[in-house]
Image: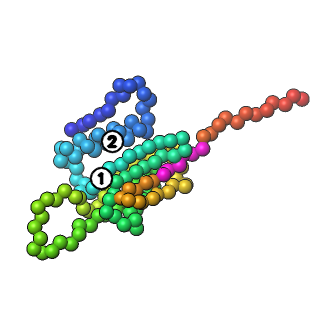
Amino acid sequence: MEVTLYNTNHMPDGWLAGQLNNFWKDFGRDLDGRSADTHVRPIADVVEDTEAYHFSFEMPGLKKDTVDVQVEDGYLSIKAERTRPELPKDAQIHLHERTYGPMRRSFQLPEDALTDGINATYRDGILDVRVPKKPETKPLRIKVNAD
């Protein structure tokens, strides 16, 4: 199943449109059952303001030292693993909805993202990653002197 987002609002194609397109492609692949990955994809929000990109991931039940955040080849990647608690041998599971195992998520960073100064905070089951933007390049006005 191939899902493509069409730009019907006449908004410029760009980084966000590409991220949404990739999301829907992955979603369609998961529905078809063809995805070979066996990891949990944490739910994420990506918000942009004038100074930075803010990535927030729902990752409850982890210790902060088990969460790995990296930037490599222009991609922000997060990895962690949630382990299943030990149950008594005679325990019967009546309902199983929580997910366990490796968690991974990656986003291609926009061209104006500055990899120096990235910070990450894990609190109350939420991983927040702040990626600052590069300062705007403004034209340099050269004063013309008379002879």
Residue 107 is covered by the magenta coloring: no
Q: Position of residue 133 (x, y in %)?
A: 54, 46
Residue range of the region highlighted in magenta in the rendering = 130-135
Coloured how?
rainbow
Which residue in the protein does label 1 denote? Answer: 41
Q: Position of residue 143 (x, y in %)?
A: 79, 32
Quarter of the figure with the C terminus: top right
Quarter of the figure with the N terminus: top left
Circle 2 — which element? helix
Q: Which of the 4 image quadrants contains residue 46?
A: top left
Label count reads 2
Q: Position of residue 21 (x, y in %)?
A: 33, 38
N-terminal label among 2 and 1: 2
Residue extending farthest to the bottom is: 89
Say which residue appears at 26% left-offset and 36% top-offset: 3
Q: What amino acid is labelled 1 in the image?
A: Arg
Say which residue appears at 38% left-offset and 25% top-offset: 9
Q: Is residue 63 above or below residue 42?
A: below
71 and 120: which is toward the camera: 120
Which residue in the protein does label 2 denote? Answer: 22
Q: What amino acid is labelled 2 in the image?
A: Asn
Q: Position of residue 36 (x, y in %)?
A: 22, 53
Say which residue appears at 52% left-offset and 53% top-offset: 115
Whether residue 72 can be seen here? no
Say which residue appears at 47% left-offset and 42% top-offset: 48
